[in-house]
Amino acid sequence: MIPDLPDPAPTDGTVVLRRWTTDDLGCVEAASREERIHEATSIPERFTEKDARAWIRRQHERARAGQGWSLAIADARTGRALGCVTLMLRPQAGVAGMGYWLVPEARNRGFATTAVGLLAAWGLEAGGLDRIEAWVEPGNDASVRVLARCGFEYEGRLRSFLKFPSRRADALAFSRIQKPRNPEP
């Protein structure tokens, strides 16, 4: 059994990571217009309110089903959803994969770095994880910078690793691990 969603919701006062709600349909709609987002995630390619509501329900089911956590990246002042950050459990015990995206208007403002940092810290502490991985397509320099600022280390290139609907791509592998616990004297 995995821990439920973070409680209290991780925040730094600017960004808050929270459950998705139907008030976030506008964020899902904006994301569906971004080819790179719907190509690499389960965001609907063509927005309909029905499909967006189904996507939000699937995000709630992830923790209940023991798959991981999917949270809205929201402006802490307004509560408005700006993107998504996920930790999805891998088959190896104590390992999860980090994923994230922002709608275009929220980019280059530090929201992704804050969200990834908050969820990684929670995952490695309260979430019971030992290792968090992130796979980034070469050329996605913004994501590489986010991961570096959040303490992720580059591990190597996985050739033809990512599968998209119409193509395959290499992945740059990054990880952040649980700091070793000090043995008792």
Image: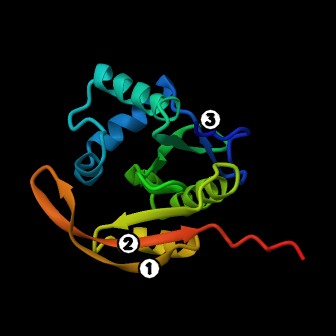
Q: Residue at x 52, y 35 (%)?
A: 63
Location of the N terminus (image quadrant) = top right
Q: Considering depth in this image, is 184 or 141 the residue closer to the camera?
A: 184
Q: Quadrant of residue 77?
A: top right
Q: Position of residue 174 (x, y in %)?
A: 44, 72
Residue 68 appears at what percent x and percent y?
49, 42
Q: Which residue is mark 2?
A: 173
User: Horizontally, is 101 left or right of 180 in the view?
Assistant: left
Q: Which mark is residue 154?
A: 1
Q: Secondary structure at mark 2?
A: strand
Q: Amino acid at mark 2?
A: Ala
Q: Are marks 2 and 1 in contact (CB under 8 Å)?
A: yes
Observer-nearest of 78 and 165: 165
Position of residue 10 measured from the top left corner of the image (x, y, whole percent):
68, 47
CA gap between label 2 and label 1 equals 6 Å
The single residue placed furthest to the right in the displayed view is 185
Mark 3 or 2 closer to N-term? 3
